[in-house]
Each structure stands twice: as structure tokens, then as C-alpha cells.
């Protein structure tokens, strides 16, 4: 069974503890460069465990992005 959930990505986040800020002033570019599914994993398992051929379970996958009312 496939469950479709829509999330709005925030492009203006508060500064991190080190003072860096994140602001994507071109969210359309995110859509244009989205080429593959992105796993929603636990504690970066796909990045840390995957390359070592260890289990890297994903809780779900981002399979598509779209613009709706100016939000990605």
C-alpha cells in the first residue's frame, strides 16, 4: 500500500548554533535537480552504514517534489 503525504519544505530556517543560516532563494532549482528518490532514514543510516554494507533501513522515500502555491 502506498501512502502519499505532502510536506512543505521550509526555505528560511533560524540560524544554527554555530551562527550559520540557511535560505534557499531559488526553490525551483531544487525541483529541477531532483533526479532520484531520497530515503528518510534513521540517524543517517544510508550515509554511514550503507557504504560499509551494513543495514541502512529507510522509514520511507521522497519520490517526487512539486511546487504548490509557491512552496516546494
Image (tube, rainbow, N blue to C red):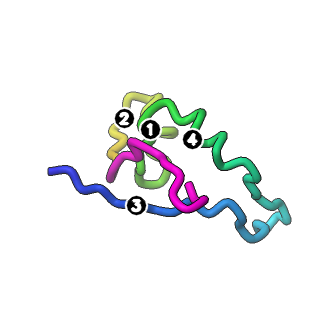
Q: Circle 3 sits on which residue? A: 6
Q: Residues within 10 Å of mark 3 (few under 14, many from 20)?
A: few
How far apart are labels 3 and 4 at the CA level?
Answer: 15 Å
Q: Residue at x 57, y 41 (%)?
A: 31
Give the residues drawn in magenta, as a range: 59-72
Q: Circle 1 sits on which residue? A: 49
Tag 1 secondary structure: loop
Is 66 magenta? The answer is yes
Is there a contact, CB below 8 Å, between mark 1 and mark 2? yes
**Outermost residue toward the left in this view:** 1
Is 71 magenta? The answer is yes
Residue 14 image point, x, y percent: 74, 71
Horizontal side of 24 relative to 70 (left or right) equals right
For marks 2 and 4, the one nearer the N-term is 4
For marks 2 and 3, the one nearer the N-term is 3
Residue 38 image point, x, y percent: 45, 41
Amino acid at each position: 500500500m502506498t501512502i502519499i503525504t505532502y510536506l512543505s519544505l521550509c526555505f528560511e530556517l533560524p540560524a544554527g548554533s554555530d551562527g550559520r543560516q540557511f535560505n534557499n532563494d531559488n526553490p525551483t532549482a531544487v525541483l529541477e535537480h531532483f533526479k532520484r528518490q531520497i530515503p528518510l532514514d534513521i540517524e543517517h543510516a544510508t550515509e554511514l552504514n550503507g557504504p560499509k554494507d551494513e543495514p541502512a533501513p529507510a522509514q520511507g522515500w521522497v519520490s517526487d517534489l512539486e511546487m504548490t502555491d509557491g512552496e516546494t
